[in-house]
Image (cartoon, helix red, strand yellow):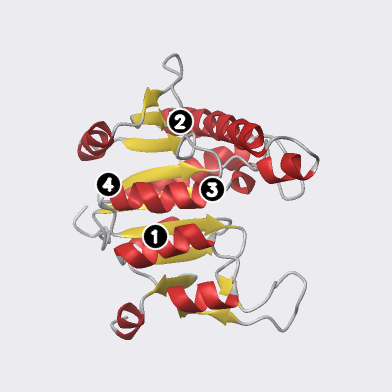
Amino acid sequence: MDDVQKSIYNRVVLKISGEGFCVAGNQGVDPVLVESVALQILDARAHGCEIAVVVGGGNLVRGAAFEKKGMNRASADHMGMLGTVINALALQDAVERQGVDSRVMTAIQMGEVAEPYILRRAIRHLEKKRVIILAGGTGNPYFSTDTTAALRASEIGAEILLKGTKVDGVYDKDPVLNEDACRFDEISYLDVINNRFRVMDSTAITLCMEQELPIRVFSLMTEGNIRRVICGEPVGTLVGSEELKENG
């Protein structure tokens, strides 16, 4: 173990969107992808880092899409929150099949399948080296799971918020539609907000900026990227203050 590269972080929050649980263009939960994500998380954890995971639910329910079709926004958002619990349970199963203890904690009360999110209990689970999987968003409509990730990271004292996506960083325009899109190695919170780059919603970015919580955006599809990030490799794009950028 002495030769194993150590994590530069003690505690991180990893945000995984619902798309990370299914094949591109599909919906539902793909067990193969879920297992792949679980193995990456455990690989990173083995390097000495406490990991809390916030999951989205867009692979099952997109509240915004239902709202556009006339559904009440609060109802649509609550449906989306329940979708995150399904993803969380799938990820918990994949983690525990590898022999690692985990806990699903949700902001919506459902005692038969998950613990309620209680800050002190969440921190205690992390201290006991369990993986905690946070579902149910904030428990309130009108808030995204990105905002949930920023909030939970601030609450539990995470040193960085990791956003695993299907894109390998932050670009000045959509790289799927534009071959000349330019990826940033580092970018400030204000640049993200002012240019409306699609990193996270403005509430999440603002909260991170206020708490001086750096964000690392990277591709979850490249095996080993979570480990590379927590070990300090410059994977993807770092979002932070100008001072953080200057200090590397």
From this view, report whether residue 215 is shown above or below residue 183: above
Can residue 229 be seen here? The reply is no
Which numbered disc flags the more N-terminal residue, 3 or 4?
3
Q: Please give the residue where the numbered disc 3 appears in the rendered image.
A: 144
Of the residues under marks 2 and 1, which one precedes in the sequence?
2
Q: Nearer the viewer, mark 2 or mark 1?
A: 1
Q: Compare residues 141 and 10 and report the one nearer the observer.
A: 141
Residue 115 position in % (x across, y down): 37, 24
3 vs 4, front mark: 3
- In three-dimensional space, the C-alpha distance between marks 4 and 2, rounded to whole angstroms, equals 20 Å
Q: Identify which residue is drawn at 37% across, 67% down.
A: 209
Residue at label 1? Answer: 207
Q: Mark 4 belongs to which amino acid?
A: Ile
Is residue 154 shown above or below 121? below
State which tag comes first along the sequence, 4 or 2: 2
Residue 63 on image: x %, y %: 67, 40
Which mark identifies residue 118? none
Residue 124 in view in this figure: yes
Q: Which residue is mark 2?
A: 92
Distance, label 3 to label 1, CA atoms, is 13 Å
Label 4, label 1: how many angstroms apart (C-alpha)?
14 Å
* Horizontal side of residue 209 vs 34, given as left or right: left
Work out which quarter of the rendered image holds the C terminus and state it: bottom left
- Going by the numbered disc 2, the residue's amino acid type is Gln
Give the total of numbered labels.
4
Cβ atoms under marks 2 and 1 closer than 8 Å: no
For marks 2 and 1, give the CA distance.
28 Å
Quadrant in which residue 177 is drawn:
bottom right
Residue under circle 4? Answer: 156
